Image (cartoon, grey):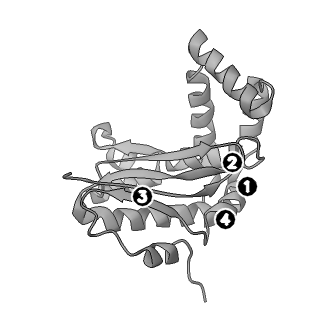
Amino acid sequence: MPLAHLAIAVEAVGWAHPDTICLMVANTLIGNWDRSFGGGMNLSSKLAQLTCHGNLCHSFQSFNTCYTDTGLWGIYMVCEPATVADMLHVVQKEWIRLCTSVTESEVARAKNLLKTNMLLQLDGSTPICEDIGRQMLCYNRRIPIPELEARVDAVNAETIREVCSKYIYDKSPAIAAVGPIEQLPDFNRIRSNMCWLRN
């Protein structure tokens, strides 16, 4: 394999947990990026700007996978062997920024994008039926779109900081990596980067 494939995630929450929507907004804040996107420093995601400017990876994709009573919130990335450590460091710095200093304008953009993506997924009878089935399994009811939008709108920068601090800050991540990963830092170093040392 010429490229390193790496996923890092923290334990999140299940579908029905009140913090799910907030973690979905945080996931949208991190976003995704691929070399073919273009945009450079004009990308809306701070991580995408840093990645593009530093030529740190080929692509990354944030994810928020929910199960019944737990979940995984993290990011998957494809890097050159020499940039694995730098990319991981930038990702962890961005996660810490979500916990400490995310701004209202960033959160507003992420909320609009999340609502747009949720509605764009419902573009035919088949995805609508899948959505109904998934919601019946997860919530025992179909959540109306206005209610879902109201839940997303209730999220602000302060709630993002609180929820991210609860699930990301100073938590042990799960890491999976394949390919040329000789430059992947030791787990203890990765774990220590999940928080800031303050005086």
Do callouts 2 and 3 mark residues in contact (Cβ within 8 Å)? no
Check disc 4: other Cα within 10 Å, few if <14, some if 14-19, many if 20+: some
In space, the residues marked 4 and 2 are separated at their CA atoms by: 12 Å
Q: Nearer the viewer, mark 2 or mark 3?
A: 3
Check disc 1: other Cα within 10 Å, few if <14, some if 14-19, many if 20+: some
Q: Which residue is mark 2?
A: 22
Do callouts 3 and 1 mark residues in contact (Cβ within 8 Å)? no
Q: Which residue is mark 3?
A: 176
Q: Which residue is mark 4?
A: 165
Q: Residue sitting at 65 percent across and 59 percent down?
A: 164
**Which one is nearer the viewer's eye here, 103 or 3?**
3
Give the residue furthest to the bottom: 199
Figure quadrant of residue 122: top right
Mark 4 / mark 2, whichever is N-terminal: 2
Do callouts 4 and 3 mark residues in contact (Cβ within 8 Å)? no
Q: Which residue is mark 1?
A: 159
